[in-house]
Image (spheres, helix red, strand yellow):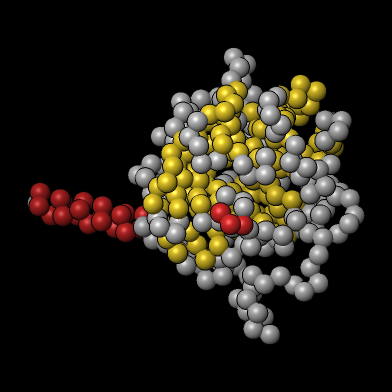
Amino acid sequence: MRRSTRERRRRKLAVRKVRLWLKKTTFHGKEERDYQGRSWIAPPKDAKASNDHCYIPKRLVHTWSGHTKGVSAIRFFPKYGHFDTFRGDISFCNDGTKFLTAGYDKNIKYWDTETGQVISTFSTGKIPYVVKLNPDDDKQSILLAGMSDKKIVQWDMNTGQITQEYDQHLGAVNTITFVDNNRRFVTSSDDKSLRVWEFGIPVVIKYISEPHMHSMPAISLHPNSNWLAAQSLDNQILIYSTRERFQLNKKKRFAGHIVAGYACQVNFSPDGRFVMSGDGEGKCWFWDWKSCKVFRTLKCHEGVCIGCEWHPLEQSKVATCGWDGLIKYW
C-alpha cells in the first residue's frame, strides 16, 4: 500500500516537472500568412504614424480573451503595433522578429516572433523579474536581466555565457531602463533605491535613496529621453531627470490612482503630452504632462489593470491588460 502511494506521488511530481518545462505560444490572429504569402509580422505597406497630436481614448474598441489567468505584461510590436502578452516580462528586439520573456519558472527564453519557437534559454537558477536587450543595433545580442537575488546579469546570447554581473542592490531588481544614448542604465529594486550604471562596468555611478522613498516597480522613459517616470508604491508617479545628476523633479508629481502593492505599468503617449498608468481598482489613468492634472480615467478591468501601452501608429488608441485575463483596445 505504501509503495503504491509513493509511486503515485512520484508520477504526479514528474507530470508537474514536465508541465513546468512546456514551451507554448498561441497565435490569435485569423491567418499566419496573407493572400500574398506575407508573414503576419510584416507591416502593412501603408502603415505610417500620423502627424496629429495624441488624444485620450473614450470608448472600448475591442476585447481579446484567451489567457486563463491574469495577464501581467503587454508589449506592442516595435514601430507598427501587433502586440504580445505574457505572465512575466517581455522585451522585443528592435525589428520585432524576436523577443525575450522572463518567467517564474526561473528561465529567460528567447523566441522567434513569427514561428513561436524558442531559440535559446538562459537561467541562473533565480527568478528573473525584468529582461532587456541593449537598444543599440550592434548590441542586440546582449541581454540584461534583473534577478530575485539582487543582481543584474548580462549575457552574450551568441555564446550563451554570462559576461558581467552588476551586484550592489539590496533587494530584488524590478526595472532596467537605458538612458544617455544607451551608454548608461537605471535600475530600481525592492530596496527602495535607484541606481545608475555605466553599461559594461559593474560600479554604481549614482545612488538615489531617501528615507521617504518607496519601491518603484515600474519605470518608463519620456519620448524626449530627458525624464524618467517612476511608479512609486505610495500611490504617485515621480519624475527624475536623465541628466548627470538624475535629480527628482519636485514640480512634477502625478497622483490620484491606487497602486500600493501592484507593479502597474506607467507609460507616455508617443508625443509626450500625456502620462498613463493602470491601478489596483481596474482603472486606466491619464494625466496632462505639463499641468500634472488628471485628464481622464477609464474603468478597464475587473481587478487590477496592470499594463497599458500606447499604440505606436494609431496615436489615439491604447491597449490595456489586467488580472481578469483580458486585453482591451480603447
> In screen coordinates, is 169 left or right of 302?
left
> In screen coordinates, is 53 left or right of 117?
right
Q: In the current view of this chain or complex, which residue is farthest to the top?
A: 211
Tell me the quarter of the picture where residue 196 sits.
Answer: top right
Q: Which of 271 and 300 is in front in this view?
A: 271
> Whole-percent x and y of residue 302?
64, 44
> In screen coordinates, is 78 left or right of 91?
right
> Whole-percent x and y of residue 292?
82, 30
**Residue at the spot 59% in from the left edge and 26% down from the top edge:** 206
Tell me the quarter of the picture where residue 232 sits.
Answer: top right
Q: Nearer the viewer, residue 207 or 213?
A: 207
Q: In this view, does 86 lie above or below 245?
A: below
Q: In the current view of this chain or complex, which residue is farthest to the right?
A: 52
**Residue at the spot 38% in from the left edge and 41% down from the top edge:** 126
> Whole-percent x and y of residue 25?
50, 64
Q: In the current view of this chain or complex, which residue is farthest to the bottom?
A: 36
**Residue at the spot 48% in from the left edge and 34% down from the top edge:** 202
> Whole-percent x and y of residue 123?
38, 49
> In this view of the protein, can residue 171 be seen by the observer?
no
**Residue at the spot 42% in from the left edge and 46% down from the top edge:** 163
Q: Is residue 326 above or below residue 187?
A: below
> In this view of the protein, can residue 279 be seen by the observer?
yes
Q: Is residue 83 above or below residue 293?
A: below
Tag count in the figure? 0
